[in-house]
């Protein structure tokens, strides 16, 4: 059993997570504001699109990124999809291995029967030779 984590360590991680979430929220709101400004400028003067991009990259040293997709993708959906794929792969492998095992079992039974037949034939030959003596 794993040792229970210290309370201060857990609280530190929780505080750090809260700070990161807050920073993420601030950055996302700033991004949406900047994208709104950029789109407004682009709509007002489409010919200056390249100039705006050059100014934006020179002014802040950042490169422009595309906005997030509107479709929300959850982590659990990806995990579930991955687990389903693994499950199907495991099931098909299991079926293939079961078929191979069954084939090998039949082959083993046939070989044992063949060996028994040849052993009986040899024993019969030996008895015939012993009877002749």
Image: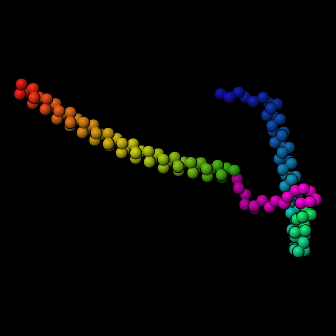
- The residue drawn where x is 92% and y is 63% is 55
> How many numbered discs sit on the rendered protein?
0
- Quarter containing the N terminus: top right
Colouring used for the render: rainbow
In the figure, 49 relative to 69: above or below? below
Observer able to see residue 40: no
- The residue drawn where x is 36% and y is 45% is 103
Q: Main secondary structure of the magenta part?
A: loop
- The residue drawn where x is 84% and y is 50% is 24
In the figure, 51 relative to 25: above or below? below
- Quarter containing the C terminus: top left
Q: Which residues are magenta?
A: 57-74
Decide if residue 52 is on the left or right side of residue 66: right
In the figure, 42 relative to 24: above or below? below
Looking at the image, which is closer to me, 122 or 105?
122
Q: Residue furthest left?
A: 132
Observer able to see residue 48: yes
Q: Residue furthest right?
A: 59
17 in magenta = no
Find residue 61 and report its horizontal and vertical position in percent.
Answer: 90, 56
Find residue 123 and report its horizontal and vertical position in percent.
Answer: 16, 30
Q: Quadrant of residue 28?
A: bottom right
Looking at the image, which is closer to me, 104 or 128?
128
Find residue 88 and report its horizontal and vertical position in percent.
Answer: 53, 50
Looking at the image, which is closer to me, 18 or 27?
27
Q: Quadrant of residue 40?
A: bottom right
Looking at the image, which is closer to me, 116 or 29?
116
Decide if residue 116 is on the left or right side of residue 28: left
Find residue 49 and report its horizontal and vertical position in percent.
Answer: 87, 70
- The residue drawn where x is 17% and y is 32% is 122
Decide if residue 129 is on the left or right side of residue 49: left
């Amino acid at each position: 059993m794993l040792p229970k984590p210290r309370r201060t360590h857990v609280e530190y991680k929780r505080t750090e997570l809260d700070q990161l979430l807050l920073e993420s929220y601030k950055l996302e709101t700033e991004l949406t504001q900047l994208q709104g400004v950029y789109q407004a400028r682009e709509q007002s003067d489409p010919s200056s699109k390249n100039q705006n991009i050059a100014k934006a990259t020179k002014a802040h040293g950042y490169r422009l990124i595309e906005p997030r997709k509107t479709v929300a993708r959850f982590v659990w959906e990806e995990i579930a999809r991955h687990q389903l794929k693994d499950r199907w792969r495991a099931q098909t492998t299991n079926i293939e291995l079961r078929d191979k095992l069954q084939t090998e079992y039949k082959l083993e039974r046939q070989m044992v029967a063949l060996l028994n037949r040849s052993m009986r034939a040899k024993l019969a030959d030996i008895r015939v030779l012993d009877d002749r003596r």
